[in-house]
Amino acid sequence: MFAQRIQKLWDRFPGDAVLITSPKNRYYYSGFTGTDAALLLTKKENLIFTDSRYHIQAKEQAQDFTLVDSAACSPVDFINQNHLEHIGFEESEMSVCEYQRMSGKFQHVVLEGISPAIREQRKMKDAFEIENIRTAAAIADAAFSYIIKEIRPGRTEKELALCLEFFMRRQGAEGLSFETIFASGQRSAMPHGTASEKPLETGDFVTMDFGCTYHGYCSDMTRTVTVGKASPKQKEIYQIVLAAQHAALETVRAGAAAKDIDAAARNIIEEAGYGKNFGHGLGHSLGLDIHERPSLSPKSEDTLSAGMLITDEPGIYLEGFGGVRIEDLLLVTENGCEDFTLSAKELLEL
Ligand code: ZN
Ligand code: ZN
């Protein structure tokens, strides 16, 4: 698996060596999860530089790599000693200070940024990635089934968000994909309203947007429910968002333009008169990061391919009233998609 990923990177970068310094890409190319290390991919061998805190872990996790004690030899030393000249590095993952310190030590080296090449490579998920994302999505689904039984007037957003997060950890998640969004009542008009001390009240919309990580891979889902009976206006907005979410889902397949998927949802919301209340793009890809390419928006120039993961998450947000978002996580297939989010989407009045 790692050999294939490294080979695919060489297909995109015809240089002498690649220096990988970011935690997620270190994991992607080697399996190493420690917090301090660098990978150096060369035509002859793959090296992992780390200090004694991580030697045992590196030997266990990065079995395709030769371990180098970073206290004795740094990647820069190795590059200089072996006269490697054309080096790819992660320019998007390095501070100006780190870049200056590194580049000042090189002799006769040409540095080339390869962050776009890595981003492009990570768009397509392999079987290992897809299975872990599917598991992370299943844990989130289970958490939703659990939390809807806990929702009642008087409990605060923060308390319920914690219950949700605790449940996911108990189910095997390592952590959260992002800070849980748990917004009720008028607060649900904030697309990214994180949990507050506000208690739930009868008549509130409650928007929950959450996900967990499993073997490093993220899930992401959103459901909106009401506390008690929904008002006619709440039902109206909910049904528009649901129709938009469904229309986009029906448009997803390999070869489709990302902006057309966005348009399938956006047209329905615009025709219903709420176009200005849907300010964000329809969705995004994810993987080791919660936001990856491609993105689905009116400006996106991406085309979908089988093996990509995307979210479908339209919303309507009315300041002073509340908001609705419904989000599923989809695996793009040749003829359509597989929906990884299995929780019901009809309006739940709890
Ligand atoms: Zn989300
Ligand atoms: Zn999302």
Image: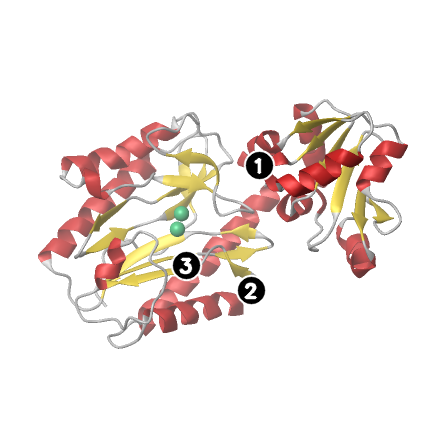
- Indicate the quadrant containing the N terminus: top left, top right, bottom left or bottom right: top right
Q: Which residue is mark 2?
A: 172
Relative to the observer, which residue lies in front, 27 or 69? 69
User: Which secondary structure, mark 2?
Assistant: loop
Q: Amino acid at mark 1?
A: Arg
Query: Badge 2: how crowded within 10 Å, few (<14), some, or many (20+)?
Result: some
Query: Badge 1: how crowded within 10 Å, few (<14), some, or many (20+)?
Result: many
- Indicate the quadrant containing the C terminus: top left, top right, bottom left or bottom right: bottom left
Which is more foreground, mark 1 or mark 2?
A: 1
Q: Is residue 160 left or right of residue 26?
A: left
Q: Residue at x 11, y 60 (%)?
A: 231
Q: Is residue 250 visible?
A: yes
Q: Residue at x 37, y 33 (%)?
A: 252
Q: Is residue 3 visible?
A: no
| Residue 187 x, y percent position in the rendering | 26, 60
Instruction: Note whether ligand 1 is within 8 Å of mark 2.
Output: no
| Residue 51 x, y percent position in the rendering | 81, 55
| CB-based contact (under 8 Å), mark 3 and mark 2 | no
Which is more foreground, mark 3 or mark 1?
A: 1
Q: Is residue 49 left or right of residue 20?
A: right
Relative to the observer, which residue lies in front, 141 or 158? 158
| Residue 147 x, y percent position in the rendering | 36, 68
Q: Amino acid at mark 3?
A: Asp
Q: Which residue is mark 1?
A: 122
Whichever of callouts 3 and 2 sits on the residue coming sooner in the sequence is 3
Q: Does 76 appear above or below 57?
A: above
Q: Which residue is mark 3?
A: 141
Q: Is residue 320 left or right of residue 68?
A: left
Q: Going by the picture, which residue comes out furthest to the bottom?
A: 154
Q: Going by the picture, which residue comes out furthest to the top?
A: 14
